Image: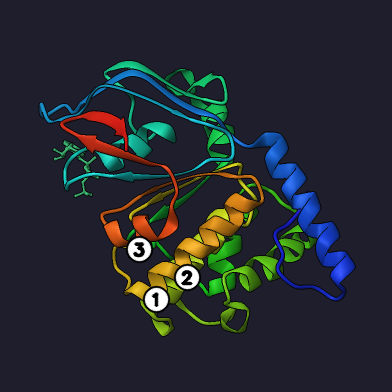
Amino acid sequence: MPVLTTEVKTEKSVDKQNSETQQHISNTAAKVQLQSVTKTYANGSHALLDANLEVKKGEFLFITGPSGSGKSTLLKLLYGQELPTQGEVIVDECNVATLRGDRLSLFRRRIGIVFQDYKLINQRTVAENVTFVLQAQGYTRKEIQRRLEPTLKLVGLLSKADCFPDQLSGGEQQRVSIARAIVSTPPLLLADEPTGNLDPDNSWQVIQILQKLNSFGATVIVTTHDEQLVRRCNHPVVQVRNGKLSRK
Ligand SMILES: Nc1ncnc2c1ncn2[C@@H]1O[C@H](COP(=O)(O)OP(=O)(O)OP(=O)(O)O)[C@@H](O)[C@H]1O
């Protein structure tokens, strides 16, 4: 399996490894569709109302909208944490609501998820946080090692591999959580307010890392309140308002 890399021994090997990764992700990059999706929570809260969306393979999309407008719900629907009340959520021709058990687990392995609050395990080192999921998925020790170093290099944390989360800054912790999300080179990356707790410099670093993965072919969907960041990037934007989605 290809890995992410920014630098290895020779330029030729960097090119080869990156082009393998790019080929792998773009062969499998995910297409995402919401078809007339309504989501009403059990307590009666309406999050989405007859929402439609199509995200092309390899697109980098921002989702913006006021607090409580349904951005996180949209992402949760995409990875099957929530089910639509009506309508269909389709990822790569697969109706997410029909997935159960092993099929849902296998589906989720193809999605990297980054949260605003990092969700790192404090008792584990950076390297352990990043490789934990690979271990759970049965990757060999050799394959895990092959993936770890270039991923930590990509997020600029190779020198912090043996640190614990509470020894890192907020920006560094968020980059660990991104490393964890991308170490398995997922074709779809969902990031829910990944820069919500970060200052402008750290926010920009995070976006650049996500853009790097996108340049390898992954489909990337990012929710954010940060209008300045959105303007700086010039990627397509979908606004969530009153449960409806519209492309800006
Ligand atoms: N588990 C839940 N149970 C009941 N209502 C919920 C639940 N999760 C979200 N909601 C409601 O659904 C609506 C959309 O919430 P959501 O978290 O998707 O918004 P958001 O745009 O991500 O907000 P924020 O920007 O503040 O994170 C809100 O009215 C919220 O109160």
Residue 213 picture quarter: bottom right
Q: Residues within 10 Å of mark 3 (few under 14, many from 20)?
A: many
Between residue 234 and residue 197, name the one nearer to us.
234
Residue at coordinates 68% horizontally, 43% vertically from top-left?
25
Residue 171 picture quarter: bottom left
Residue 81 coordinates in the image, percent (x, y) = 37, 35
**Disc number placed over residue 201 in the picture, else none:** 1
Q: Quadrant of ligand 1?
A: top left
Residue annotated with mark 2: 205
Residue at coordinates 51% horizontally, 30% vertically from top-left?
104
Classify residue 240 as left or right of residue 89: left
Identify the amino acid type marked 1.
Asp
Between residue 62 and residue 119, name the one nearer to us.
62
**Disc number placed over residue 234 in the picture, else none:** none
Classify residue 59 as left or right of residue 193: right
Residue 80 coordinates in the image, percent (x, y) = 41, 31
Mark with earlier residue (2, 3):
3
Classify residue 182 as left or right of residue 19: left
Please, is residue 149 above or below residue 194 in the view? below
Identify the amino acid type marked 3.
Thr
Residue annotated with mark 3: 195
Q: Is mark 2 within 8 Å of ligand 1?
A: no
Mark with earlier residue (1, 3):
3
Tag 1–tag 2 contact (CB < 8 Å): yes
Residue 34 can be seen, yes or no: yes
Residue 165 picture quarter: bottom left
Please, is residue 48 above or below residue 189 in the view? above
